[in-house]
Image: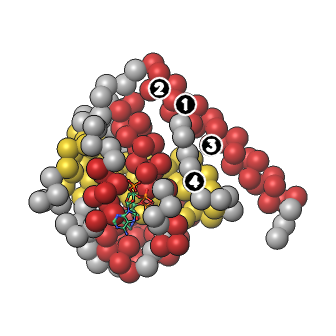
């Protein structure tokens, strides 16, 4: 996978005990980004409840980390049971890291995870004026059916294959290895 990320940035899945980091990231969003992420105004309490629920089964969050801090996230939620064929995806990137290609890599990873879980229909709620998200969705128009007249996009990921499963496993292994190296380098080179 080609990952042209901003300097010092890495993407990996969040671990089950990282819901606090997810909450702190969502709380750091500027008001406009928060509004776009949740398609409307939400309170800090709602964000705390929402991020807590991201530790559950059927939720996969890919995180974008800079120097160990979560600065962006892509959340994939299955609707209903773990084996549900429908899901929902939502993206959040803190303002200084927007428009640097992070959303593109996060959407690519999310589509791969959706495909490997046989999710056939993936919804993304997007405000009609959200040009950046629409431009991002257009880059994946082979996999995405997006009606910008409404606020909901639908994805039909193709079926998983041994290769698509291997790609996700390789990305996961790479994410764990990079996280370990990142912690070590910050331990031995404190700022
Ligand atoms: C929407 C969001 C996920 C996009 O991620 P991003 O990292 O900023 O986007 P990228 O840098 O990958 O750019 C995606 C495309 O949008 C285009 N783009 C970048 N900035 C733009 C802008 N201000 N207006 C319109 N298009 C823009 C880019 O040109 C790029 O397309 P290209 O590669 O063909 O040039 C991110 O900006 C974000 O989190 N915004 C706040 C929350 C939100 O809107 N969430 C979406 C609803 S779930």
Q: Is residue 80 left or right of residue 12?
A: left
- What whole-number distance in Å separates the C-alpha atoms at marks 3 and 1? 10 Å
Q: Which residue corresponds to mark 1?
A: 169
Please identify, in this view, whether the residue under mark 4 or under mark 3 is nearer the observer.
Answer: 4
Point out the tag, 1 or 4, that comes first from the N-terminus: 4
Circle number at residue 22 = none
Is residue 139 positioned above or below 81 on the image? below
Residue appearing at x 22%, y 70% in the figure: 129
**Residue 63, x across and y down, in percent:** 52, 54
Asked if residue 79 shows in the view, the reply is no
Is residue 171 positioned above or below 48 on the image? above
Q: Secondary structure at mark 3?
A: helix
Q: Secondary structure at mark 1?
A: helix
- What whole-number distance in Å separates the C-alpha atoms at marks 4 and 3? 14 Å
**Residue 165, x across and y down, in percent:** 47, 26
- What whole-number distance in Å separates the C-alpha atoms at marks 2 and 3? 15 Å
Circle number at residue 5 = 4
Point out the tag, 2 or 4, that comes first from the N-terminus: 4
Please identify, in this view, whether the residue under mark 1 or under mark 4 is nearer the observer.
Answer: 4
Q: Which residue corresponds to mark 2?
A: 165
Crowd around label 4: few <14 · some 14–19 · many ≥20 (10 Å): some
Q: Which residue corresponds to mark 3?
A: 175
Point out the tag, 4 or 3, that comes first from the N-terminus: 4
Residue appearing at x 24%, y 58% in the figure: 125
Q: Residue furthest top?
A: 162
């Amino acid at each position: 996978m080609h990952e042209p990320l901003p300097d010092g940035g890495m993407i990996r899945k969040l671990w089950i005990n990282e819901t606090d980091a997810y909450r702190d990231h969502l709380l750091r969003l500027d008001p406009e980004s928060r509004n776009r992420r949740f398609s409307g105004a939400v309170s800090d309490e709602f964000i705390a409840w929402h991020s807590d629920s991201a530790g559950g089964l059927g939720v996969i969050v890919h995180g974008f980390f800079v120097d160990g801090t979560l600065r962006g996230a892509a959340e994939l939620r299955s609707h209903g049971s773990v084996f549900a064929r429908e899901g929902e995806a939502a993206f959040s990137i803190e303002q200084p890291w927007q428009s640097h290609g992070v959303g593109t890599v996060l959407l690519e990873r999310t589509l791969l995870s959706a495909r490997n879980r046989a999710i056939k229909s993936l919804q993304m709620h997007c405000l009609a004026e959200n040009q950046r998200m629409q431009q991002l969705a257009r880059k994946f128009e082979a996999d995405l059916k997006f009606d910008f007249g409404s606020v909901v996009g639908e994805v039909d990921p193709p079926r998983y294959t041994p290769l698509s499963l291997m790609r996700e496993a390789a990305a996961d292994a790479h994410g764990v290895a990079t996280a370990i190296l990142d912690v070590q380098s910050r331990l031995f080179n404190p700022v």
